[in-house]
Image (cartoon, rainbow, N blue to C red):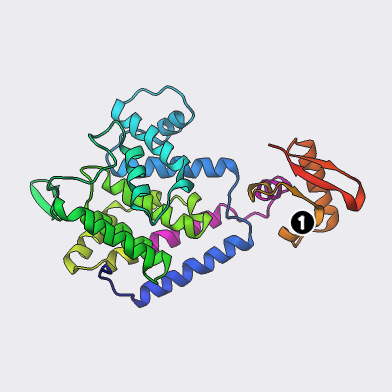
Amino acid sequence: MKPPYTISPLMLRLVASISEKLGIIKAGFFEKPAPQLRKQNKIKTIHASLKIEGNTLTEDQVTAIIEDKRVLGPAKDILEVINAKNVYDNLQMFDPVSSQSFLSAHRMMMEGLIDKPGRYRTEQVGIAQGSKVTHLAPPPGNVHYLMEDLFSYLKHEEELTLIKSCVFHYELEFIHPFVDGNGRMGRLWQSVILTKENPVFENLPFETLINQTQREYYEALSQSDKMGKSDVFIEYMLRVIDESLVELMENKTKPLSPEGRLDYFISTDVAFFTRKDYQRIFKNISAATASRDLKQGIEMGLLEKSGEKNQTIYRVKH
C-alpha cells in the first residue's frame, strides 16, 4: 500500500533546486570532500542527531570520543556516541530496501542502551509532551506488516528517491516501530536511502539543520499527522536538504588545489592510471599541471610510477 501524500508545486521546485545543486557539486568535484571535512561532517551529524534525542555531550566531547580519547560524561551519552560512530562508519554497508539491514542498523545504534535492540516493539507506545499524548503509535501487532509495506513502497514505487526518502522518514516516525531510537533511525535511514542514490549525501550533515530547526521538525511531523499524509514533512525535509547543499557548496567555493585534486582522484578508487586518465577527470587543467600534480603525489608518498614518458603508469599506494 502506497503511503498517502500529494506532490505539490513546492516539492517540485525544491527537487529541481536540489538537482541543480547536485549538478554543480559534481562539476566542481565536491562529491567527496577532503578527509578532514568528511570527519567534521560526521561529527556534526552524530552530535546533532543525538542532541535532538537529549544527549548532553558537546561537539568537542563527541570529537574526543570519536578520536578514542577519554571523556567525562554520562555513560549512556558516551555509549550513544560510540554506537552512532560505528553505524555511520559503516553507512555504505546498509541496504536501504532491506528490513533486515534496517534492523541490523538499529541493533548497532541501540546496543547496550535498550533491551532487545534490533527488534520491533511488542508493546503499545505513544509520544507525550508534558502530560498530553501527542501521538499514539499503531498497535504493536501491526508494526511488522506496516514496516514491510513501507519497505515494499521504497523498493517498488516509481517515485523520485528524494521524495521516497522523506516519505520513509515520516512514516517511520508515525509507525514508531521501536521502543526507543525511532528518531535517530528515521534520520539515519533517510541518509542511507539518499547515499545509495548519490554518494554526496554521505557527507551532508543535514541533521545539523534539523537540530537547529527542531520546532519546525516536530511541527511538520505534527501537521502531517493531523492531515493524514506526509506533505508538510516532505516539504520541510526537502528544504533542509536544499539548505544543506548550499552549506556544502559554500565550503567548497575555492578552486581545487593540487592536493585537493589528488585527494579527489584517489577517492575514486582508481588503482593504476596514466596522466591522460587523470586529465579525463580534470578536463580544465593542462598536461603540464597534471604532470606537476602527479609529481607532487609521488613526493607526498601517495603515488608511485613505472615507465617513462608516454609509457608512464601511476599506482595509488595504500
Q: Residue at x 40, y 55 (%)?
A: 96
Looking at the rendered structure, the kind of residue marked 1 is: Asp
Residue 66 lies, in percent from the top left, at 46, 32
Circle 1 Cα neighbour tier, 10 Å, few/some/many (<14 / 14–19 / ≥20): few
Secondary structure found at label 1: helix
Q: Residue furthest left?
A: 131
Q: How many marks?
A: 1
Please tell me in which quadrant of the rendered image residue 77 appears. Answer: top left
Residue 209 lies, in percent from the top left, at 39, 52
Q: Is residue 126 above or below residue 233?
A: above
Task: Quarter of the image for the C terminus: give it.
Answer: top right
Magenta span of residues: 238-265
Q: Camera-side residue: 125 or 225?
A: 125
Q: Residue at x 48, y 55 (%)?
A: 201
Please tell me in which quadrant of the rendered image residue 13 appears. Answer: bottom left
Q: Is residue 94 above or below residue 111?
A: below
Q: Residue furthest bottom?
A: 9
Residue 235 lies, in percent from the top left, at 34, 66
Q: Residue at x 43, y 32 (%)?
A: 60
Q: Residue at x 22, y 34 (%)?
A: 115
Residue 110 lies, in percent from the top left, at 30, 37
Q: Main secondary structure of the magenta part?
A: helix
Residue located beneath label 1 in the image? 277
